[in-house]
Image: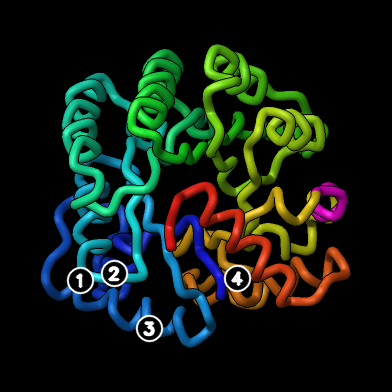
Amino acid sequence: MFVDTHCHLNLMARQQTGEQPMDDIPLTQEQLAAIAPIVDAAAQENVNTILTIGTTLTESRNSITIAQQHPSVWAVVGLHPNDCTTDWRNAFASIKNLVADKEKNKLVGIGETGLDYYWPNYHKQHQRDAFKAHIELALAHDLALVIHLRPSKPSLTHELTLSTPDSAQDELFELLLPYKNQITRGIMHCFSHDNAFAQTALEWGFVLGIGGVITYPKNESLRDIIRTIPLEKLVLETDAPFLAPQIARGKQNHPKYIAIIAQFLADLKGVNLHEVATQTTATAQRIFGTP
């Protein structure tokens, strides 16, 4: 049994019905119907639990609707840092209302939230303020925290590598510091940072989300880091429909590809697939409280 701890079923459904994935509108009945084959295909690869992640208020509501319709799907709600615009507080007030009824809404986490300085015209203070608000919401309702971190985009004359310092990493831990001893269940989503970041995250009690990027040929430095990290500190994710593993690169990612990522991780760490499945599932269940 595997768990996909991070995907966007709502965006997949839009793609599969020929729409733009980032439309940020309620899903149609046709789009909702397109999710069942996705969930079924994942189950055939022993992916029996799926976390679908909100990025805006509308997409958080879509995630709840999907979770309520599928027993194996659970929702995480929040505002992606890139969506923390001038009126983010109004949207966040509605997110809080969703969380207040977390059992009915099948909510098991808050996110994805954090810092994203990759695209131009981001608003740093909005992102910082929203991140703190998400942390406090997760703590107030005893929910897992799903953290997104993306540093600045490399310039034409400077290639950002795993060893390149970037203020986003330091700022993230600066913002987390007041809550360091309170956060007991958190994931660093789509881990692709340096070893210093990994070690700090682990020391602070976070686990790392491992996805398709670990399979990309250029990411040998990332693989070197993952080899040294205990398996119980890792969970599996796809971030579908984005970041498909190398074997499906350029295609729509899918929760069923967790099986591919798991086998790659098993080979990388020199353990059998059953051990990866057992340990990553146990960790995901501890973090999110899913069955």
* Secondary element at tag 1: helix
Q: CA distance from mark 3 to mark 4?
A: 22 Å
Report the residue marked by disc 2: 13
Q: Earlier in the sequence, mark 3 or mark 2?
A: 2
Residue beneath disc 1: 31
Crowding near pointer 1: few (<14 within 10 Å), some, many (20+)?
A: many
Q: Quadrant of residue 163?
A: top right
N-terminal label among 4 and 1: 1
> How far apart in space, not on screen, are marks 3 and 2 (Cα)?
14 Å
Chief secondary structure of the magenta span?
Answer: helix
Residue corresponding to mark 4: 249
Q: Where, by quadrant of the figure, is residue 21 drawn?
A: bottom left
Residue 161 is a magenta residue: no
Q: Residues within 10 Å of mark 2 (few under 14, many from 20)?
A: many
Looking at the rendering, the stretch of residues picked out in magenta corresponds to 223-229
Q: Is residue 24 visible?
A: no
Taking the spot 50% from the left edge, 63% from the top edge, the residue there is 4
